[in-house]
Amino acid sequence: MIIEIKDTLVSMDIITEEFCCDLEACKGKCCIIGDAGAPVTMDEVMELENVLDETWDDLSASAQAVIDKQGVAYTDQEGDLVTSIVNGKDCVFTYYDDLTLDLPDSEGKTRQCTIQNCCLCATEKAYRAGKTSWCKPISCALYPIRVKELKNGLTALNYHQWDICIDGRRKGRELHMPVYKFLREPLIRRFGQEWYDELCVVAEEVKKQLM
């Protein structure tokens, strides 16, 4: 079932399915597994180029070489503009470091956990450090929601269930976290507060119907 909100078509499973990234389990696999980079717009390519100075020292020598050769993005086999990758998989803006987080548990409490050798995003690091005003491509922030611009002017939102994210689905069920609530901030960033508020209203109606 598809729900239409303004000029977007939202897949029902974005409301009914549950998800919460589990970095403790996966250590950021979605940034390093796959045969293409993250989808980006031309505006985002310009943003990536603008933050190179602030992120360069965090990038691997191999990533720096790829960027020097082909730039921060390329067109993949399907004709989509995506971030450049290293060795056929790793996004060039990834780096590895230990990460300490306050993680929620099933009882609503938090615990501090240090994840060793986690795959992280250099552009997000620069943003959180106050070095830049731009965080990262919206396709990265919205995952596991995939956004596609349709020829009729509408925008389709679908929930992508990748096998490497099985831990995220498990954790989402443990925390009773719907996909749309887990991705609240990036959804608002992409579509606006009014759109998100309308999505929440629709989601509540859907839940009542399913009860």
Image (cartoon, rainbow, N blue to C red):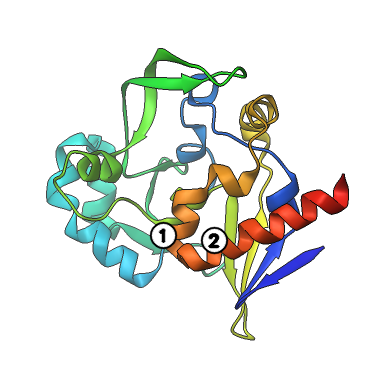
Q: Is any atom of residue 38 visible in this view?
A: no
What's under tag 1, amino acid-wise?
A: Arg
* Extreme residue toward the bottom, this view: 152
Q: How many marks?
A: 2
Q: Viewer-proximal residue, 6 or 108?
A: 108
Q: Which residue is mark 2?
A: 196
Horizontal relation, residue 84 to residue 109: left or right: left
Q: Viewer-proximal residue, 64 or 167?
A: 167
Q: Secondary structure at mark 1?
A: helix
Residue 13 image offset from top left, x and y in percent: 74, 51
Residue 174 image offset from top left, x and y in percent: 68, 24
Horizontal relation, residue 41 to residue 69: left or right: right
For the residues labelled 1 and 2, the Cα–Cα distance comes to: 10 Å
Quadrant assignment, res 71: bottom left
Q: Viewer-proximal residue, 145 or 110?
A: 110
Q: Is any atom of residue 18 visible in this view?
A: yes
Choose the circle earlier in sequence order: 1 or 2.
Answer: 1
Horizontal relation, residue 35 to residue 50: left or right: right
Quadrant assignment, res 117: top left
Depicted 185 relative to depicted 87: above or below: below
Depicted 117 relative to depicted 143: above or below: above
Q: Which residue is mark 1?
A: 189
Residue 72 image offset from top left, x and y in percent: 30, 57
